[in-house]
């Protein structure tokens, strides 16, 4: 068992087993540089950050292309496996609708935002470094876009990509950043990002039973 290595990329492997090594080096390269994605003539670029395009994956684009872009969701999922948030590009959940935005550096997907429509939210405020639910019933006025996941490849973190990425997508959808709902629970980095972009509070959704909530 001592021979099993755990790399910073999250993969456990046995170094001298050839297949293991090949598998690890392929995964490690994606973890560092992002997921290779094919370009198509009809791709939809909705904005650019630091020379990197933002691509849209929505229902009106062909399924094989959405599946190609969804490979970035899989890479993000492997990077944070305790926080499931699926996106495979299909229309499995027509009631709620879903779409994704991909940040692309050359031919690699280096970031993703997965959105889904939801209609029940709780207003949250910040208390020191935690979120507190405000003592109101859920708000179910309109269907909103909820950020199910935002992920940036680790080499690009803390360089404002996350902040600009969500702002660009909001602008494209003609929203303010704080109009988005947020799927809970947050990761630590997710909480810091949302606190920085919505310092007054935010609309949260998901399974509140999973949260360590202090009712205000
Ligand atoms: C969450 C995530 C997308 C943030 O992206 P990012 O590009 O690093 O964020 P930014 O550089 O735009 O930072 C925005 C603000 O968030 C806060 N922040 C984000 N990560 C932080 C960290 N590790 N420590 C302290 N503050 C942090 C800061 O206030 C920052 O503003 P500042 O740099 O001016 O201080 C990124 O950390 C990530 O992909 N993490 C893994 C996936 C994840 O946890 N996703 C969230 C839940 S779905
Ligand atoms: Zn590795």
Image: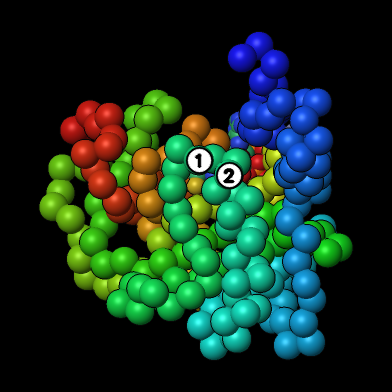
Please tell me whether residue 148 is drawn above or below residue 201 in the rendered image: below
**CB atoms of marks 1 and 2 within 8 Å:** yes
Q: Quadrant of residue 74?
A: bottom right
Estimate the x, y position of residue 160 in percent, counting from the top left.
Answer: 70, 46
Residue 93 visible, this angle: yes
Q: Secondary structure at mark 1?
A: loop
Left or right of residue 170: residue 208? left
Residue drawn at (38%, 58%) of the image: 181
Left or right of residue 2: residue 30? right
Please tell me whether residue 172 is drawn above or below residue 194 in the rendered image: below
Q: How is the image coloured?
A: rainbow
Q: Residues within 10 Å of mark 2 (few under 14, many from 20)?
A: some
Residue 163 visible, this angle: no
Q: Residues within 10 Å of mark 1 (few under 14, many from 20)?
A: few
Estimate the x, y position of residue 14 in percent, counting from the top left.
Answer: 71, 26
Estimate the x, y position of residue 175 in percent, counting from the top left.
Answer: 49, 70
Q: Quadrant of the C terminus?
A: top left
Query: Residues under labels 1 and 2: Cα distance?
Result: 5 Å
Residue tagged by mark 2? Answer: 78
Where's ligand 1: which quadrant?
top right
Q: Quadrant of the N terminus?
A: top right
Estimate the x, y position of residue 119 in percent, counting from the top left.
Answer: 26, 67
Residue tagged by mark 1? Answer: 81
Residue drawn at (79%, 76%) of the image: 39
Q: Secondary structure at mark 2?
A: helix
Disc 2: residue Cβ within 8 A of ligand 2's nearest atom: no
Residue drawn at (37%, 30%) of the image: 130
Residue drawn at (54%, 88%) of the image: 60
């Amino acid at each position: 068992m001592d021979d099993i290595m755990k790399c910073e990329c999250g993969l456990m492997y046995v170094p001298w087993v050839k297949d293991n090594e090949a598998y690890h080096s392929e995964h490690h390269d994606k973890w560092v540089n992002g997921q290779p994605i094919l370009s198509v003539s009809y791709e939809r670029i909705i904005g650019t950050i630091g020379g990197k395009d933002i691509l849209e994956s929505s229902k009106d684009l062909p399924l094989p292309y959405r599946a190609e872009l969804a490979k970035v969701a899989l890479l993000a999922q492997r990077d944070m496996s305790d926080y499931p948030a699926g996106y495979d590009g299909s229309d499995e959940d027509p009631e709620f609708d879903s779409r994704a935005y991909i940040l692309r550096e050359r031919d690699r997907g280096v970031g993703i935002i997965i959105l889904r429509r939801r209609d029940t939210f709780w207003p949250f405020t910040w208390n020191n470094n935690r979120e507190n639910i405000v003592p109101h019933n859920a708000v179910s006025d309109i269907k909103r876009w909820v950020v199910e996941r935002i992920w940036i490849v680790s080499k690009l973190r803390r360089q404002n990509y996350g902040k600009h990425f969500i702002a660009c997508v909001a602008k494209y959808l003609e929203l303010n950043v704080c109009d988005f709902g947020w799927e809970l629970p947050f990761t630590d980095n997710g909480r810091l990002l949302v606190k920085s972009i919505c310092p007054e509070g935010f609309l949260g959704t998901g399974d509140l039973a999973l949260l360590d909530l202090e009712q205000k």
